[in-house]
């Protein structure tokens, strides 16, 4: 194991341990309802909402496929 891979492994291990702790600290800070946490939440809200944006064309195609499947399932006389 060379020095570069050792350092990379060490950094990854520290990040795995440190990241949940930092999330915990941020959650406690936010629960204290400080103005800074409120401002940070407002600043980060657009990034959270950006993940939910769907392409309208994709949505239309997906709905058409679902309707086609429904029509195929309902085709024919009932037994």
Image: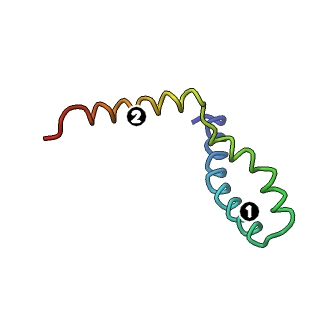
Q: Residues within 10 Å of mark 2 (few under 14, many from 20)?
A: few
User: Nearest the camera: 59 or 40?
Assistant: 59
Q: Which mark is residue 62?
A: none
N-terminal of the two: label 1 or label 2?
1
- The residue sitting at the bottom extreme is 32
In percent of width and height, residue 24 lies at 68, 64
Residue at 54 percent across and 28 percent down: it is 58
- 56 vs 78, nearest the viewer: 78
SS under mark 2: helix
For label 1, the residue is: 26
Q: Which residue is located at x 20 percent, y 32 percent?
A: 76
Q: Which residue is mark 2?
A: 66
Its colouring scheme is rainbow
What is the x, y in percent for residue 18?
67, 56
What is the residue that sits farthest to the front in this orientation?
Answer: 77
Q: Residue furthest left?
A: 79
Residue 6, quarter of the rendered image: top right
Instruction: Look at 41% across and 29% down and name the residue there.
Output: 65
Q: CA distance from mark 1 to mark 2?
A: 42 Å
Q: Secondary structure at mark 1?
A: helix
Q: Quadrant of the N terminus?
A: top right
Categorize mark 1 by other alpha carbons within 10 Å: few (<14), some (14-19), many (20+).
few
Q: Please tell me whether residue 25 is drawn above or below residue 58 in the rendered image.
A: below
Residue 29 locus on image (x, y percent): 77, 67
Q: Classify residue 57 by image quadrant.
A: top right
Identify the residue at horizontal 81%, vertical 56% (top origin): 40
Left or right: where 1 falls relative to 67: right
């Amino acid at each position: 194991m060379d020095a570069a891979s050792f350092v990379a492994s060490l950094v990854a291990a520290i990040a795995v341990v440190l990241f949940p702790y930092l999330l915990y600290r941020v959650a406690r800070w936010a629960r204290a309802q400080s103005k800074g946490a409120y401002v940070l939440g407002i600043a980060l809200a657009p990034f959270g909402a950006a993940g939910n944006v769907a392409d309208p064309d994709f949505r239309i195609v997906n709905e058409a496929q679902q309707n086609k499947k429904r029509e195929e399932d309902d085709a024919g006389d009932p037994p």
